[in-house]
Image: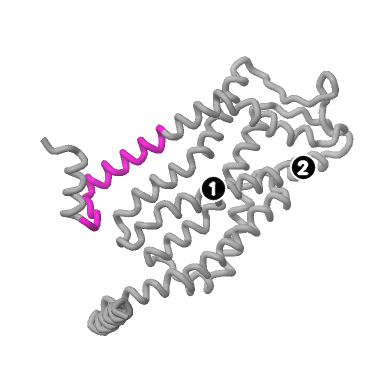
Amino acid sequence: MRTPTRRRLRRLRDNPEGEMSILEHLAELRDRLIRACLALVITSIVAFTWLYEPLLRFVTQFYCDIPAKYRVATAGGGCRLLALGPLDPFGIRIKVALTAGLVLAMPYIAYQLWRFITPGLRRNEKRYAVPFALASTILFAMGVTLATYTIPRGIGFLVALGGDNLTVFFQADRYLRFVLFMGLAFGLTFEFPLVLIFLSMVGILSSRTMLKAWRAAVAIIIVVAAVVTPTQDPINLFAMAIPMWIFYFGAAAIARFLIEPARARRRAQLEHPASTAPSEAASRSQAGADRDR
């Protein structure tokens, strides 16, 4: 009886490029989604059990940093959020656990996404699976980190707009929904350069097109940042827009100086294989002569 490993090795020998039919693509998508969901469930359980209390204290600190004259002080001069319904504490714990679980599972989810995309790529492009997962994780973490610095300032800005005669006492469900949404929004928008680089790798978007449309891109980024940031304050707006501008031109530079020259070299090798063969043979003979010496 043939083992699954032998069947897999035989499949790789018979189909080295990994080409699949529509049904095989759907089956591959199902398997990748199942693995990503299992990873999310495991990391959410870990966050629900061990990380909830530290995360809640960290997020609540944004509210506590508001000057005391703008917020309601609880017993002992501290600050706490308000839960209105009996199910609110459990629902809040679920939301915090799912968000933290998504952050923890992001490297594995990104890896599964790239592994699903790789059958449509060339063999030399498939080796970017691990760098893609690593880059997406770093960018997502950068976005969440930036959100933790801008959200308190944005909240303070909005609260101060109400004036000294207005006191705030945030409802826990709405406050945490806002904070978690902002963190995820910053993290996901920081994946923007990876989308541009991928489109450049597959030949859909060129650096010339990106640089030619930079004015429209700058305007669209401003609109997207204004829609994604519900506070509508200039602090969070430009905190999201400025990195996206930098990422846009950075992706154009990567496409111009790395991706497109590599594609041009591959095209030249395919169009003129005879001209590259002598140079390769000469290099091999030179290496042999060096070894003989």
In the rendered image, residue 274, in percent from the top left (x then y), is placed at: 23, 83
Residues drawn in magenta: 16-38
Instruction: Answer whether residue 127 is magenta in the image.
Output: no
Would you name the residue on which mark 2 appears? 158
Q: What residue type is labelled 2?
A: Leu
Q: What element carries label 2?
A: helix
Q: In which quarter of the image is the N terminus?
A: top left
> For the residues marked 2 and 1, what is the alpha-carbon distance in whole angstroms?
24 Å
* Image quadrant in which you'd find residue 178: top right
Q: Where is residue 14 in the image (x, y as percent from the top left)?
A: 16, 54
Is residue 276 at all visible to an observer of this figure? no
At x 40%, y 53%, the residue is: 129
First in sequence: mark 2 vs mark 1: 2
- Which disc number belongs to residue 188? 1
Crowding at dot 1, Cα within 10 Å, few <14 / some 14-19 / many 20+, comes out as some
Q: What residue lies at 25% left-to-right and 84% top-to-bottom? A: 278
Q: In this view, does 267 lie above or below 143?
A: below
**Main SS class of the magenta portion in the image:** helix
